[in-house]
Structures are given as structure tokens and as C-alpha cells.
Image (cartoon, grey):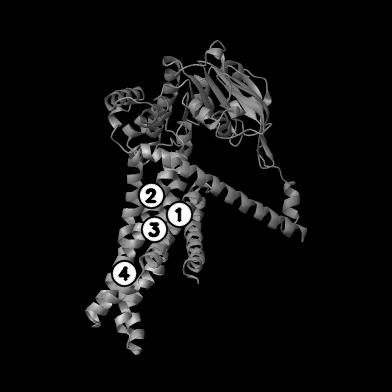
Amino acid sequence: MIEKLRGLGAWGLQALLRLGRAHVLLLAMLRGFVDILRRPRLLVEQLFSVGVLTILIISVAGLFVGMVLGLQGYYILSRFGGETALGLMVAASLVRELGPVLTALLFAGRAGSALTAEIGLMKATEQLSGLEMMAVNPQYRVLAPRFLAGLISVPLLAAMFSVLGVAGGWMVGGGMLGVDQAAFWNGMQEGIDFEDDVINGVIKSLVFGLVCTWIAIFQGYDCVPTSEGVSRATTRTVVHSSLAVLGLDFVLTALMFGE
Amino acid sequence: MTENPKNAADDILVRIRGLRFLRGERAIFDGLDIDIPRGKVTAIMGPSGTGKTTLLKLIGGQLRPHAGSIEFDGQNVHALSTAELYELRMRMGMLFQSGALLTDMSVFDNVAFPLREHTRLSESMIRKLVLLKLEAVGLRGARDLMPAELSGGMARRVALARAIALDPMMIMYDEPFTGQDPISMGVLVQLIRRLNDAARISSVVVSHDVAETLRIADLVYVISDGKVVESGTPQQLAESGGEWTRQFIQGLPDGPVPFHYAAAALSDDLLGGAA
């Protein structure tokens, strides 16, 4: 019994230590933003590898999700003769929920895991230690640009996901199933509120971007520098990011859309 | 690089006193005292797992000791602020066992990296300096290659060119000869000695490759169980009467470091049933 308690205590202390290290790293990366102003090229490079290279998966996923929403929405709404609300339904689902959430989940799987693996391997091959010994702070030089790139990329990718999702919904609803096109777009225009829907969606994707990129970078930076350690860290990035996004989505939705 | 004027007259560049460092419950160093003189090649030798690489990380301020002090050029490494520590590291170079080259940069850009980070030299000046550093290690012709295209020996030579880019006072070599073919090993041995003498750098070589290290060292420390077992010139060590040092230098399979890991008697194990 005492052994079990001791084990639980040790686990709790380790978890607290990791949490502390993660917050110290977050502060260091925020301080590193000043450094990026002097060398914007570092940010541009990371925007490409973190953001631009994720566009394809986001675009394809957004299009298909929108098409499925259009199809399912039509089947349900047509039972009540409400097909004209299809545009509103597709857009509201995407802008409020599916855009930010699915983008964050896909981002964690594509860019987050790549960030963890890259930083973990840099640690395992002593590149981060090498930078420290060259009097270059890796938290500023390597981590901060990646963090800022993630923060910028996720809201933009979420916007792209939503736009392509709406296009997918319109292709199915308006193009294939014969929903009135004017009603499709008018319903969307009248029903979507810029502040309540669009801005809240952007805030969500900003929060998700911060959390996913922070988790990915921390897992890489804090991993055991072996092939097994990097592999475990990469898995943890995807699992922790996904759970954090889904949990935070509930909290944010309750705060934003609750009465 | 500038020398601390207060300590310029001091022959000792790195002074380690009463160093204690633990990993978990295990003491890696327990009361270690080492002096690394200026302008010499100092070898720190010992079997695998004695904490030789850890010692270099302690000297470079990447790890903090649990007790004791490490002074570099008269400055207590672990009493410095982060900014001062980074300032100090510009006077040190380190050659990692793996080379630690940045894999997304060419050989040229790797060597240019510290110059671009820490100086305001023009690109044409940086180009000249990089080519000179690469010439010193015999790899000027490999400047456009990527790290993945280099052999292990070439990667270490590029890392050496990068380590001397800022003309440091001291270079620390972490197991420079491990896994090298005889030609690469010969090149590295010659380079370490030549750079030390030509550029008046102080060198610290951490290694368990006895023959190669003794060929170039001016002073050798042999460490085991967290303490210095013996120190002196290579000649003095070769003539040492110490059993431990003799076993290490001559590579004897049995001695104070036993061949068998501590275990119960073989007969007890064989007759004792399943364990």
C-alpha cells in the first residue's frame, strides 16, 4: 500500500515537474519572438514547413467534410422541407466547430508530429547541445520561430478548411442535389454572425494552434534522446494534442455560446 | 578571442575543485580536482560510463554540479548569468562525438553559422574565413556537400572547422576517435595537435582510445569512480606502478576492474534452480 502511494506521489511530482518545464519553455519561446523580429527569414522558413506543407491535407479534408455535411444536411433538412437552410447549416458547423477542431487535429497529426520528431532528433544528434556550446540559444533560434509559425498557421489553415468546406457543401447541395443556390447563399449570409461565429471560430483556432504547437515543441525538446524516446514523444504529441483540442473545444464552446 | 586580463598570467585555464555531480542516487563525480593548463593538450581518460562527456558538459555550463566549482579563465562557470555564460561559451569550442552538424545546412553554412550569429562581418569576409577554416581541416573542396553526404571522419573535421570559427581559447573534444577508420583517426590526431600548437589553443580531449590519446597529450588525467586515479605525462603513466592505470593503459581484461560483473558463485547459480 505504502509502495503504491509512494509510486503515485513520484508520478505526481514528475507530472508537475514536466508541467513546470513546459511553462518555462513557453515563456522562453515568447521571449524569443523579439529575436525573430531581427531575423524574419527564420519565421518564413518555418511558415513554409509548418503551414504551407499542411495546406494539401487541410484542403482535401475541408472539401470532403463539406461535401459530407452537404449530403447529410440535405437528407435531414429535406424531411422537413428545410433544404434552403443547408447553406447556413454547413457554414455554421464549419465556422463554429469543425473548421477549428478538425484543422487542429489534422495539424497535430501532420505538422505537430513532424515538429516533435525534428526537434527530438536534433536533441538526439546533439544539434541542440551544439548550438548551446556555440553560444546560440536553441530556444530562441530553433523553437521560437516554429512556435510562432504554428500560431500564425493554424487560424489561416482553419479559415481555408472552412472556405473549402462551404465550397464542398455547395457543390453537393447546389450542384448535385438541386438546392436553390440563392437560398443556399442567402441563408448563410443572414444566419452567420461575424462576431459570434467567425471571430469566435478564429479565437478557437488561435487557442488550438497555441496548444498544439506548444505540446509538439515541448515533447520534442523534453524527450529522451533515443530513437525510442523520439518515437514515444511523437505519439504523445498526437494523443495529448487531440485530447487537449477536444477538451478545450468544449470549454470554449460553453464560454462563447452559452447563455 | 579576448582573455580575461586578471587571469592572463595564470597558467591554469580551467580549474575544477571538489566537483560533485549525481545522476539520481549515483555519484558520477565525488570530489574531483583537475587543472587544465593553457596551451597544452590535456587528455581525460577512463572507461566508458565514468562521466567523461558529463565533465565536458559541466565545464561548458550545460549541467550544474551538486557541489564544488569550475573556473574557466578565472570565472566561476556556474555563478554566471545566462547572458554571461553565453558570452563565456564564445571563448570555448566543442567537438561532439556525433559532430552535431546542423543537418539542414551545407558544410559551408555550418562553418559560417557561428560567424553569422556572433559577428557583423560582411558575407565576403565570412566566405574567406570559412574557406580558410575548411582548408585547415582539409575539406575546402567539400564546402557544398550536405552533412548526410559526409563520412563520420569528415563530419568531425567539419565540426572542428566550425568549433575554431570564432578562434576560441579552448576546444573540448568528446571522444574524437571513436568509430574512426585508421586514416581518419590519423588525420584527427594530427589535426588536434597541429591546431593546438599553431593557434595556441588549449585542448581537452576526452577519450578511451589509449594509444591515439597518449600520442598527442601533454598531460593525462585518468578518472574512475568519480575521482582522479592518476595524472601525469603520457610517459609517467606508461611507467606507472598503479594496478588500475596499468590495466587501463595496457587494456588487460582482468584486474582491479574485474572481468566478471558482480554475481553469486557460478556453482550456486547452476545448482540453485530457476532464478
- In which quadrant is the N terminus of chain B drawn? top left
Amino acid type, mark 1: Leu
Image vertical order of residue B27 relative to residue B39, above or below: below
Q: Are marks 4 and 1 on the same chain?
A: yes
Q: CA distance from mark 4 to mark 3?
A: 19 Å
| Left or right: where A153 falls relative to A243 | left
Q: Nearer the viewer, residue A151 or B243?
A: A151
Left or right: A179 as drawn, with respect to A191: left
Q: Secondary structure at mark 1?
A: helix
Q: Earlier in the sequence, mark 4 or mark 3?
A: 3
Work out whether mark 2 precedes mark 1 in sequence or the reverse, and give the earlier one: 2
Residue B200 visible (yes or no): yes
- Are callouts 1 and 3 both on one chain? yes
**Which residue matches tag 1?**
A210
Q: Amino acid at mark 4?
A: Gly
Q: Position of residue A32 (x, y in %)?
A: 44, 41
Residue B76's label in the rendered image is: none
What distance separates the C-alpha of mark 2 from that of mark 1? 10 Å
Residue corresponding to mark 2? A149
Where residue B93 appears, as percent x and y from the top left, is 46, 27
**Which badge, 4 or 1, comes first in the chain's sequence?**
4
Residue B35 placed where, x, y %?
60, 19
Mark 3 belongs to chain? A
Element carrying mark 3:
helix
Residues at discs 4 and 3 both on one chain: yes
Gap between marks 3 and 2 measured at Cα: 14 Å
Q: Secondary structure at mark 2?
A: helix
Closest to the observer, B21 or A237? A237
> Mark 3 = which residue?
A110
Q: Give the labeled residue for mark 4.
A: A165
Q: How far apart, in angstroms, are the residues tagged by discs 2 and 4?
A: 24 Å
